[in-house]
């Protein structure tokens, strides 16, 4: 394949647009695209069938990550070689690998009616830490969770930190955004789902003793405040994670991981 000339200017229109996609959630929503960074993540996007509009890579990346690029470049509509200082502009990491892809937002966003009632799900309300959101999605995919319900005020699903922490789950896991989280839980309950609120309350049922039927939805709340009172009220039940140690609470990603593990473990019985 004939390689393109090297883009050496940070003022290049395509480069500036890619940088804006990396830095602005509003611009990502407006354009319906986002910027993925890293050899493995971009290759994951390609293998998962994501629509890669533009692939950027440095000459050093072409040498070090040839195997990854062989998966990425054939899937890209356009290919651009960039100078190292241009890669620095696009990167959100201290040591960029020199591979970036502008990607169309995947089509696996669903409506509640498109979610399979026989599956098992995680629901996240107002999660603000991108690393937490990405970690939950990664764990959900690994455990075989059917999909995720996200409140509209969660942090941006396609932000650089979420993408990295999700390890490619963003490209594959079905998800649904709920404008009103509590109303969404009520609606799911009426549709045959079984939303369960995770609460730090010793009077709630221990997650190790709870039963999770088909259609269960494990609801986890904001890192500092947990689920809203309205969301807890809207759910069909409450569960808590026993914590005999001295800590008062768990990280949101850790809580979600335990809940999802128990949900999938009890389904197998």
Image: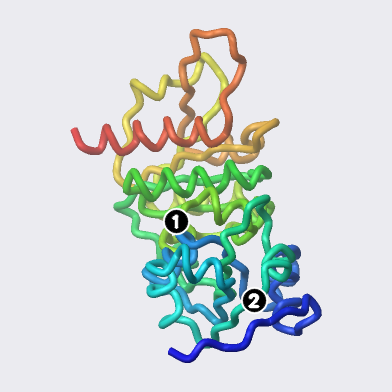
Q: Nearer the viewer, residue 123 or 3?
A: 3
Residue drawn at (69%, 31%) of the image: 225
Q: Is residue 110 visible?
A: no
Question: Residue 37's mark?
Answer: none
Question: Residue 169's mark?
Answer: 1
Locate residue 18, reporting x and y percent.
Answer: 69, 74
Question: Residue 82's mark?
Answer: 2
Q: Quadrant of residue 124?
A: top right
Residue drawn at (51%, 43%) of the image: 135
Above-or-below relation of 51 to 206: below
Locate residue 224, reporting x and y percent.
Answer: 69, 31
215 lies left or right of 248: left
Extreme residue toward the left, this view: 269
Q: Nearer the viewer, residue 43 or 208?
A: 43
- Across the whole image, how many numbered discs are drawn on residues? 2
Q: Quadrant of the C terminus?
A: top left
Extreme residue toward the bottom, this view: 2
Which of disc 1 and disc 2 is earlier in sequence? 2
185 lies left or right of 29: left
Above-or-below relation of 28 to 261: below
Residue drawn at (59%, 52%) of the image: 162
Q: Nearer the viewer, residue 51 or 57?
A: 57
> Could you classify mark 1 by the number of other residues whose Cα lies within 10 Å: few (under 14), some (14-19), or many (20 or more)?
many
């Amino acid at each position: 394949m004939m390689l393109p000339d090297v883009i050496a200017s940070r003022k290049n229109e395509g480069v500036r647009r890619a940088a804006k996609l990396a830095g602005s959630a509003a611009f990502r929503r407006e354009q319906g695209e986002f910027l993925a960074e890293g050899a493995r993540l971009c290759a994951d996007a390609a293998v998962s069938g994501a629509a890669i509009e533009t692939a950027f890579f440095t000459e050093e990346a072409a040498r070090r990550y040839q195997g990854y690029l062989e998966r990425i470049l054939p899937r890209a509509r356009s290919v651009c070689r960039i100078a190292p200082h241009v890669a620095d502009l696009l990167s959100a990491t201290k040591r960029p690998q020199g591979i970036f892809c502008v990607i169309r937002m995947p089509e696996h966003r669903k409506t509640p009616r498109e979610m399979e009632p026989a599956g098992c799900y995680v629901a996240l309300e107002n999660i603000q830490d991108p690393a937490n959101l990405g970690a939950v999605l990664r764990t959900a995919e690994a455990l075989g969770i059917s999909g995720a319900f996200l409140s509209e005020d969660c942090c941006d699903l396609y932000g650089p930190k979420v993408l990295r922490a999700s390890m490619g789950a963003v490209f594959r896991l079905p998800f649904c955004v709920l404008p009103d989280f509590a109303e969404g839980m009520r609606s799911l309950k009426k549709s045959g789902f079984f939303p369960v609120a995770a609460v730090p309350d010793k009077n709630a049922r221990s997650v190790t003793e709870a039963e999770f039927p088909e259609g269960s939805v494990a609801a986890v709340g904001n890192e500092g405040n947990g689920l809203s009172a309205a969301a807890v009220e809207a759910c069909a039940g409450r569960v808590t994670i026993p914590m005999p140690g001295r800590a008062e609470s768990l990280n949101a990603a850790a809580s979600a991981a335990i809940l999802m593990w128990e949900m999938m473990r009890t389904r197998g019985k």
